[in-house]
Image (cartoon, helix red, strand yellow):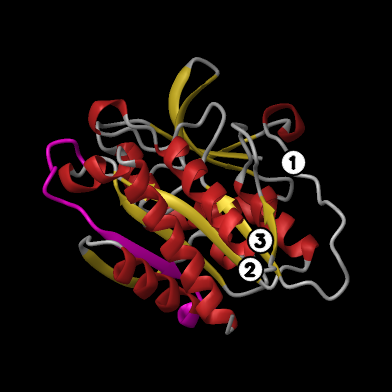
Amino acid sequence: FRVVVPITSGDTLQQVRNVEPEAFRTTVDGQVVVQVGLFREQQRADEVYRSLVAANLPAKILSASAPAVASTPLLPPIPQGAMVVVIDPGHGGRDPGAVGIGGLQEKQINTTISNRVQQQLQAAGITVLMTRSSDVFVDLDARAQYANRAGANLFVSIHANAISMSRPEVNGLETYYFSSGERLARSIHNAVLRNVNMRDRGVRTARFYVLRYTTMPSVLVETGFVTGAEDAARFRDPAAVNRIADGIARGILDYLGR
């Protein structure tokens, strides 16, 4: 089942991404829409549909052949007794995520930061699994179920934020959790701010799909605005991007007492 929202104005995509950050613009049966997710179970599609309608968005549920349009990450062997952290680089493949100043693509930022976080955690002896390790499209449910099947101890989804291109003054770090992830969210958020001189937009609760449908402490980190003058400049500086990633890794290790 495919959940979509027809594009009715210039800010439809951003409105939908406020409900589900993985949403992206695409074409379905010749109509330009925002695709929110692909689901094998109608119950899951219905729940996302209701959250969009509650936000006054004209959502629709369409039939879809999920295996033909999305990758499903495969679980590698996991050492018995290992501490497992799943890192989830947002977007990928035909979904670039947010596109910001100078054509800056969110999916590329997410991949770079996630790979660095993986390296730092592995160096500390943590088993790290990635929902994607290349530029492929993985849907919402597949990301959450991958972490659940792995029996992961933690789930960290990495994104970059966006707002209208006419608002370059909006910049800063946001970290989201749903239920059990508050302490993890605060640990990561504070560690990034210690490592990077950037604006603090706070730790917040959200009902994002990957936070609700993972069974371990889970957070989603918005590492800055690709549409923000300050943040976009930082994203173009490899050393600054590494400092963001190192802060995320440090926050995870602090949470784990490592």
What is the magenta segment's predominant secondary structure?
loop
Q: Earlier in the sequence, mark 1 or mark 3?
A: 1
Q: Residues within 10 Å of mark 2 (few under 14, many from 20)?
A: few
Find numbered disc 1 in the image and state the secondary structure of the residue it sits on.
Answer: loop
Q: Quadrant of the C terminus?
A: bottom right
- In the picture, the disc for residue 18 is none
21, above or below 68, in the image: below
Towards the viewer: 52 or 243: 243
Task: Residue 23: give x, y in percent of width and height.
Answer: 46, 41
- Residue type, numbered disc 1: Thr
Q: Residues within 10 Å of mark 3 (few under 14, many from 20)?
A: some
- Residue type, numbered disc 2: Ala
Residue drawn 55% across the image and 74% down it: 253
Q: Nearer the viewer, mark 2 or mark 1?
A: 2
Q: CA distance from mark 1 to mark 3?
A: 23 Å
Position of 194 with respect to 88 (left or right) is left
Q: Earlier in the sequence, mark 2 or mark 1?
A: 1
Residue of label 3: 122
Q: Say if mark 2 contacts mark 1, CB within 8 Å.
A: no
Give the magenta range: 163-183
Q: CA distance from mark 2 to mark 3?
A: 5 Å
Q: Say if mark 2 contacts mark 3, CB within 8 Å.
A: yes
Q: Say if mark 1 contacts mark 3, CB within 8 Å.
A: no
Q: Is residue 58 magenta?
A: no
Q: Nearer the viewer, mark 1 or mark 3?
A: 3
Q: Is residue 165 magenta?
A: yes
Towards the viewer: 245 or 145: 245
Residue of label 1: 72
- Residue type, numbered disc 3: Gln
Residue of label 2: 124
Task: Residue 202: give x, y in percent of width and height.
Answer: 28, 71
